Image (cartoon, rainbow, N blue to C red):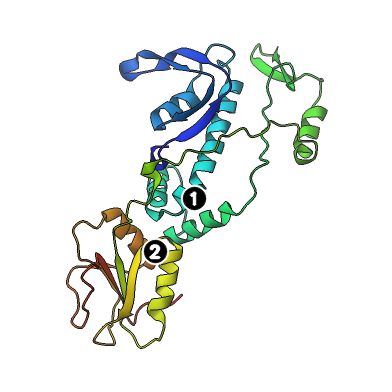
Amino acid sequence: MDAVDGVTVNVDRSFSDPLYPAENFAYQTVSFARGVQQMNGDTALKYARSRHGSNGEGSDFARSRRQQKMLLALKEKVLSVSTLTNPIRIKGILDALDTHITTNMEFYEVLALIKMAKEFSTDRIITLVLDTNDAGYLEPGVGPDGAFVLLPKSGNFRDINHAVLRIFEDTPGENDDTPTQIKSIAAQPIFKDINIEIQNGTWHAGLAARMKKRLTDASFPVLTIGNTAVRPQPTSAIYVLRETAPTTLVDALKEELHIPIKEKIPEGAIAEKKTDILVILGEDMNDQ
């Protein structure tokens, strides 16, 4: 959650949990007030994981609802303009999820997929929780071996099957009340004063221009393009000319282009004075 500067959540009802785990096997009390509020990573985790809340929030069903709210809020924040226009923020999200997700997708592919998701209509997301409340489908019971079980109120699974099979037709689930996510100052691109220059080190006409479009579409700040004074250049590389250039931006650029970061600029490549990062496209560059 901290990777996107927190999320905005609509808390349905106030509750307190005096048995939330703390350090050294101790407990702490966490409380949440009813209404729309901004949550950072720590607060969001406590809201989603609380198991012993008052006011009807002490069941696993209530916790499932809160976790669904958190996922929907995170979805809105990730797909917000302030996040999509910042590849560094997206990279931070992927890094945070790295230990929990395994994928063979490259960074630029994930970036393209997220941008596609922004165009999807998600205003009518429906969630369905099978629980024991008055309108729920389940009731508590005891199994043959004395274990606690949940049984269908109707005595069979007909109503539950109907709800699942026709969830998009009868809309028996709950409406998505996820608030509009707050666009904080910290959510703005953090590299607005960083300039990238692209130089075409090949005789392939228009290579630098095509690369500029690719990078600007991914929200990288390209200042200018041109050709190296000496051509052809055999290899492509990224050169960091200013120590102030964010490491995260350089890493994201490396993952986007799949070319190495080098220190010594080759002969025949002269960068503009305002350039912070120089990208030279060599003969080994895959022009996509």
x and y, in percent, of residue 78 in the image: 49, 45
SS at mark 2 in the image: helix
Residue at x 72%, y 20% (from the top left corner): 138
| Residues at circles 1 and 2 in contact by the CB criterion of under 8 Å | no
Label 1, on which residue?
81
Instruction: Note whether 60 is above or below 193 in the view shown.
Output: above
Residue in front for this viewpoint, 30 or 216:
216
x and y, in percent, of residue 115 in the image: 53, 56
In the figure, residue 4 lies in which quadrant? top left
Residue in front for this viewpoint, 6 or 100:
6
- CA–CA distance between discs 1 and 2? 20 Å
In the figure, residue 249 lies in which quadrant? bottom left
x and y, in percent, of residue 259 in the image: 32, 69
Label 2, on which residue?
256
Earlier-in-chain disc, 1 versus 2? 1
Q: Which mark is residue 139?
A: none
Residue at x 32%, y 19% (from the top left corner): 23
- Tally the numbered discs: 2
SS at mark 1 in the image: helix
Inspect this view and state whether residue 175 appears. Answer: yes
Residue in front for this viewpoint, 224 or 72:
224
**Neighbour class for label 2 at 10 Å: few (<14), some, many (≥20)?**
some
**Neighbour class for label 1 at 10 Å: few (<14), some, many (≥20)?**
some
Left-right relation of 181 to 211: right
| Residue type pointed to by label 2 | Glu
| Residue type pointed to by label 1 | Val
Instruction: Note whether 88 is above or below 148 in the view shown.
Output: below
Instruction: Note whether 195 is above or below 90 in the view shown.
Output: below
x and y, in percent, of residue 166 in the image: 79, 38
* Quarter placement of the N terminus: top left
Inspect this view and state whether residue 102 appears. Answer: no
